[in-house]
Amino acid sequence: QVQLVDSGGGLVQTGGSLRLSCAASGRTIVTFAMGWFRQAPGKEREFVAALSRVRGIASYSDSVKGRFTISKDDAQNTVLLQMNSLKPEDTAVYYCAASIRVGRPPVSVDEYSYWGHGTQVTVSS
């Protein structure tokens, strides 16, 4: 079992930046692949970014590639999502998630077993 608490969301103007944080407890994140997803009102939860379990290989959705960066601090047992050049279409609730999958970074909701409660990101135009 691992508990995830995501934070760092807020209101920002178009072109601004935010950094989301996901603090894990109960188990070390070294034993998980870690990911970020988002869900806008009326839409399904979608993949944003992930780090693979062993090699820490990153994967990004096409919509955020080049603007968002996922990283982790094993000592702090924390995963970060740096979001730059934010757009109104990035507005959503963002969720941190942990997966026991090995190999490639997991990119689908079904591959994750543990979820944070979500943090709201709103980008104004």
Image (cartoon, rainbow, N blue to C red):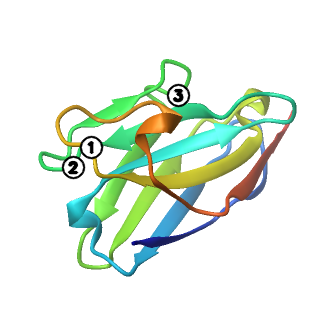
**Amino acid beneath label 2:** Arg
**Would residue 7 appear left or right of 73 to someone viewing this image?**
right
Residue drawn at x 24%, y 78% is: 75
- Say which mark, if any, is on residue 64: 3
**Precedes in sequence: disc 3 or disc 2:** 2
Tell me, yes or no, whether the two marked residues, 1 and 2, touch with CB atoms within 8 Å.
yes
- Say which mark, if any, is on residue 53: 2
**Precedes in sequence: disc 1 or disc 2:** 2
Residue drawn at x 42%, y 73% is: 24
- Say which mark, if any, is on residue 101: 1
Q: List x then y, in percent, for residue 114.
A: 48, 58
Q: List x then y, in percent, for residue 85.
A: 61, 35
Question: From the viewer's perspective, is residue 35 above or below residue 41?
Answer: below
**Nearest-to-viewer mark from 1 and 3:** 1
Mark 3 lies on a secondary structure that is loop
Q: List x then y, in percent, for residue 25.
A: 41, 80
**Would residue 24 appear left or right of 101 to someone viewing this image?**
right
